Amino acid sequence: MGNNFHNRPFVVITIDGPAGAGKTTIAKKLALRLGFCMLDSGALYRAVALALIRGGVDPNNHSIPNAAICALNIGVEPGIGSMKVTLGTEDVSAAIRSEDVGVAASKFSAKSQVREFLLGIQRSVAEKCDLVAEGRDMGAVIFPLADVKFFLTADDKTRAKRRYEELFHKGVNSNFSEVLDEMRARDHRDETRNLAPLAAAPDAMIVDTTNFTPDEILEIMLERIDSRVGGLK
Ligand code: DC
């Protein structure tokens, strides 16, 4: 696109925040509206977790055997408003969505071997296309020079309700208080880990999504983007 103010070839917009804050929904809408690629970094952590679980690595172990990291064969195919993730030739975009893989991803993501492994893969996506990147550390660690940064948040009961409804629509029978407990446990792990803990970058705009619809959030974000990188809307 070439009209960003850092003189880099592609525009990068980052969206960070805890589970259930609305990142994926909003990132997708925003990417489709702007015609940008999407980096769903959580999907990469999930793909690593799936591969390690299949390889017999226990997420509760202190470290991961180096051979298991070397054997990882993760592929990313960013598209406009979507992203395909592969293990070798297998498309695992659906398989990584289970609760078990999400919990394992949260545990494996605290390990430096995993974060270092994924760093280059994530940055390389921004060399191919304009990007909406969503996750936990996009603005603070992976793309510190991003053109526009957001941090989405919402109260934990609202986030758990969204997750509960998502599971319900998928046909998964869950219990609201268990979903809330698991979400709080995940928040705690993501916020207190030593490496890249979940936190807003100092220059991120914080958006509380509790009382807004995705389309209302989108409009708030587009205003901000327009004031930072004019002419994209
Ligand atoms: O957003 P998600 O639920 O798909 O992410 C799965 C886990 O991956 C999450 O619990 C924390 C980890 N993660 C991370 O540490 N850093 C990111 N940028 C994205 C996800």
Image (tube, grey):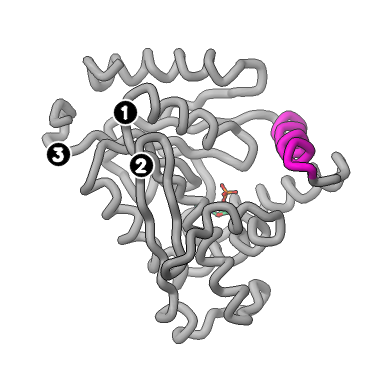
- Name the amino acid, label 1: Gly
Residue 9 got which mark? 3
Ranked by sequence position, the earlier of labels 2 and 3 is: 3
Quarter location, residue 173: top right
Task: Report the residue at 51% width, 66% height from top.
Answer: 48
Q: Is residue 194 among what the camera can see?
A: no
- Name the amino acid, label 2: Gly
Q: Which residue is the site of mark 1?
A: 35
Q: CA distance from mark 2 to mark 3?
A: 17 Å
Q: Nearer the viewer, residue 42 or 5?
A: 42
- Count up the numbered dots: 3
Q: Is residue 166 magenta?
A: yes
Q: Is residue 56 above or below residue 192?
A: below
Q: Is residue 84 left or right of residue 168?
A: left
Ranked by sequence position, the earlier of labels 1 and 3 is: 3
Q: Is residue 33 above or below residue 195?
A: above
Q: Which residue is the site of mark 2?
A: 79
